[in-house]
């Protein structure tokens, strides 16, 4: 088999066989297929697409390109959650301890942030001492002991995806639905969970700008998981405004802690309960979503969910005092109010530009080797549907002096206004 023949076949709109896809993934992983040929293949997929069967085969080939986590030693139903990336999305830091507080095994490998979206690992590392790199053996032991682990990808999981994503990032082929689906699902399948919930973001702050594209991606990922005997749910959520109020690493950890205390923003709480209820049902604790939500709410109110977060932090070397006393997190050098430039109802908050403004301050990175400042970011004061005038504070810039004025201007210009009150819908669709 020749790589050139596979490239030409896909370029001309052909459907690749299982053998051809496995040949491509194996050859690129072991180095026998060079970058320039893989670039041509990825561009052909970008323009010609893939059938669901092709995308599923690609995901499985990428999953099997390296190690696969064997979680069979962990008794019970193992759950995982993945977000396609959003602004202010600290859901995992709330959801994982909340679900684990019911005794459900939450075994999650997370990623770092890149561009305008934040990463769970960067947020967790804002807690002094928190160690994201633990061995697969320790990962399993920790889940067995306290029902939860939130770590970075370890070992040799999905090496094909690492190489392919790096190449997609520099060849303009990131925004391809079959490539996104195969990339995400290869990692989720390799991580070994029995039940997976996908939070597919839609809107200005997401990779998927339209509901149609998001639904296509979600359906494809659910089908891939289903074919591999996983219980799958995809929830399509609105990213035409940031989730919660805080954008930035330690700021988002503080907001997650407050949510576990029952004092968090409504949209973040509602999303965590919505996803959590489905994972509880999938795990078999109840067959009623309403009962599942009651169980989760009870563990927020009795403090068990917050206690589980503290156990997680301590188990991974972090200082759990920060969970009970978030005032220990250091403030930025400057906290600057940003005022509305006009009056009216907030119609939309461009999440992409809010994320970019936070990144300019140092809260995010352009490339994975960039260092981030865990303290800086933005805290919104108003959300979609709120009325403002020229004296209204839209939010606060938390700056240590980097690109402050540019971030202020970008944040202020992220707001769109209307003469009439606008309602925002958080959950746009659910695919099972």
Image (cartoon, rainbow, N blue to C red):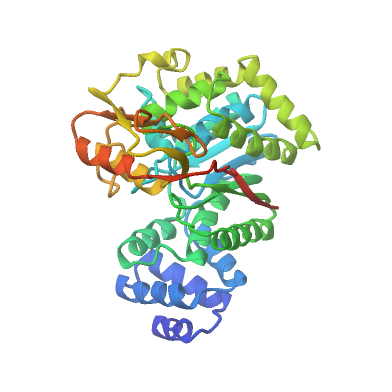
The residue under the point 44% across, 72% down is 46
In the image, residue 138 lies at what x, y percent? 49, 31
Name above or below for residue 19 compared with residue 429. below
Q: Nearer the viewer, residue 155 or 296?
A: 296
Name above or below for residue 281 compared with residue 100. below
Q: Say left or right for 232 vs 158.
A: right
Q: Say left or right for 89 vs 328.
A: right
The residue under the point 72% across, 25% down is 295
Q: Nearer the viewer, residue 385 or 79?
A: 385
Q: Nearer the viewer, residue 87 or 28?
A: 87
Which quadrant holds residue 292?
A: top right
Name above or below for residue 330 compared with residue 46. above
In the image, residue 265 lies at what x, y percent? 53, 28
Number of labelled discs? 0
Regarding residue 141, the answer to whether it shows in the image is: no
The residue under the point 54% across, 29% down is 94
Q: Say left or right for 79 vs 374.
A: right
Which quadrant holds residue 168?
A: bottom left
In the image, residue 38 lies at what x, y percent? 37, 72
The residue under the point 43% across, 42% down is 87
In the image, residue 23 lies at what x, y percent? 47, 74
Regarding residue 386, the answer to whether it shows in the image is: yes
């Amino acid at each position: 088999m020749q790589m050139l023949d596979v490239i030409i076949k896909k370029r001309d709109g052909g459907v690749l066989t299982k053998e051809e896809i496995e040949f491509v993934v194996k050859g690129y992983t072991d180095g026998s297929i060079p970058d320039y040929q893989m670039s041509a293949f990825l561009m052909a997929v970008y323009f010609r697409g893939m059938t669901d069967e092709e995308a599923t085969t690609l995901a499985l080939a990428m999953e099997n390109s390296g190690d696969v986590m064997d979680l069979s030693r962990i008794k019970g139903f193992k759950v995982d959650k993945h977000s396609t990336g959003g602004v202010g999305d600290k859901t995992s830091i709330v959801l994982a301890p909340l679900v684990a507080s019911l005794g459900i095994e939450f075994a999650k490998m997370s990623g770092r942030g890149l561009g305008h979206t934040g990463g769970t690992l960067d947020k967790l590392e804002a807690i002094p001492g928190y160690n994201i790199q633990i061995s697969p053996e320790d990962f399993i032991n920790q889940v067995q002991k306290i029902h939860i682990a939130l770590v970075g990808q370890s070992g040799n999981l999905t090496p094909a995806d690492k190489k392919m994503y790096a190449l997609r990032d520099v060849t303009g082929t990131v925004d391809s639905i079959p490539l996104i689906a195969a990339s995400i699902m290869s990692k989720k399948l390799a991580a070994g969970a029995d039940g997976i919930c996908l939070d597919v973001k839609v809107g200005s702050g997401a990779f998927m700008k339209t509901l149609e594209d998001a639904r296509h991606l979600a359906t494809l990922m659910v089908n891939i998981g289903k074919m591999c005997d996983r219980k799958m749910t995809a929830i399509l959520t609105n990213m035409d405004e940031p989730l919660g109020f805080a954008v930035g690493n330690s700021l988002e950890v503080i907001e997650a802690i407050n949510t576990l205390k029952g004092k968090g923003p409504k949209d973040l709480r509602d999303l965590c309960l919505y996803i959590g209820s489905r994972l509880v049902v999938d795990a078999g604790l109840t067959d009623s979503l309403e009962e599942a939500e009651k169980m989760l709410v009870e563990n927020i109110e009795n403090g068990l969910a917050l206690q589980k977060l503290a156990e997680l932090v301590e188990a991974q070397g972090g200082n759990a005092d920060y969970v009970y006393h978030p005032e220990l997190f250091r403030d930025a050098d400057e906290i600057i109010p940003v005022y509305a430039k006009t009056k009216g109802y907030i119609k939309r908050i461009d999440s992409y530009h809010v994320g970019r403004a936070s990144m300019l301050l140092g809260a995010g990175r352009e490339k994975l080797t960039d260092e981030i400042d865990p303290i800086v970011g933005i805290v919104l004061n108003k959300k979609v549907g709120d009325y403002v005038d020229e004296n209204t504070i839209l939010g606060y810039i938390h700056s240590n002096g980097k690109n402050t004025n540019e971030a202020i201007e970008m944040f202020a210009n992220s707001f769109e206004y209307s003469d009439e009150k606008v309602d925002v819908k958080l959950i746009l669709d659910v695919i099972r």
